[in-house]
Image (tube, grey):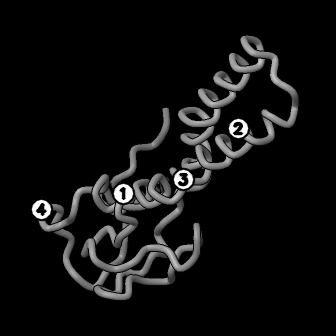
């Protein structure tokens, strides 16, 4: 469960996709989420939401790998097989294309995953060991 000072009301939250694209706080939609390129702030500078719940893990890298790197590498292979350019042409075209295609979507994807975690109150799974838990047969 995500801890916060205010009660959780999903109807007042900005949509996770909007928060992700803007790289803004998932609760207020105004505060900055990052202090560096991919480094999270400790908390929102507007509403004070602590970002210690946020753990997108390798999600942004996976999405970039699948939806950006694979098509760019396929284009580079097609370019090589069709035109057989010298290596320096690939250094001037393919390498910058791969860098831009990988780096550009990382921030918004990480912000979207964090906003989705907050919006859906995603948390690490825990075993229910209380008195209401059913014994295993």
Whole-number angstrom distance, CA of label 3 to CA of label 2: 17 Å
Q: Which one is closest to the eye, mark 3 or mark 1?
A: 3
Disc 3 to disc 2: CB gap under 8 Å:
no
Q: Which one is closest to the eye, mark 4 or mark 2?
A: 2
> Residue at (37%, 58%) from the top-left corner?
20
User: Does residue 120 sit above or below 54 in this rendering?
Assistant: above
Q: Is residue 103 visible?
A: yes
Q: Which one is closest to the eye, mark 4 or mark 1?
A: 1
| Percent position of residue 74, x then y | 66, 22
Q: Which one is closest to the eye, mark 2 or mark 1?
A: 2
Whole-number angstrom distance, CA of label 3 to CA of label 4: 30 Å
State the quadrant of the N terminus.
Answer: bottom left
| Percent position of residue 57, x then y | 59, 55
Disc 2 to disc 1: CB gap under 8 Å:
no
Q: Going from the N terminus, do you reach mark 3 or mark 4 first?
A: 4
Whole-number angstrom distance, CA of label 4 to CA of label 1: 19 Å
Q: Going from the N terminus, do you reach mark 2 or mark 1 first?
A: 1
Disc 3 to disc 4: CB gap under 8 Å:
no
Determine which residue is flagged by label 2.
Answer: 93
Mark 4 neighbour class, 10 Å CA radius: few under 14, some 14 to 19, many 20 or more: few
Determine which residue is flagged by label 4.
Answer: 11
Residue toward you, 131 or 67:
67
How many badges with numbers are in the image?
4
- Secondary structure, mark 3, is loop
Residue toward you, 109 or 114:
109
Whole-number angstrom distance, CA of label 4 to CA of label 2: 46 Å
Q: Which one is closest to the eye, mark 3 or mark 4?
A: 3
Determine which residue is flagged by label 1.
Answer: 21
Determine which residue is flagged by label 3.
Answer: 104
In this rendering, would 83 be left or right of 128?
A: right
């Amino acid at each position: 469960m995500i801890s916060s000072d205010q009660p959780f009301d999903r109807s007042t939250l900005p949509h996770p996709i909007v928060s992700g694209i803007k790289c803004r706080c998932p609760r207020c939609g105004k505060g900055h989420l990052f202090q560096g390129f991919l480094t999270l702030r400790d908390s929102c500078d507007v509403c004070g939401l602590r970002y210690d719940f946020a753990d997108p893990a390798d999600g942004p890298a996976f999405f970039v790998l699948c939806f950006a790197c694979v098509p760019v590498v396929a284009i580079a292979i097609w370019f090589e097989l069709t035109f057989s350019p010298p290596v320096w042409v690939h250094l001037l075209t393919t390498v910058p294309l791969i860098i831009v295609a990988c780096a550009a979507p990382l921030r918004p994807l990480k912000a979207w995953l964090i906003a989705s975690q907050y919006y859906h109150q995603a948390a690490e799974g825990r075993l229910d060991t209380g008195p209401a838990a059913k014994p295993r047969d």
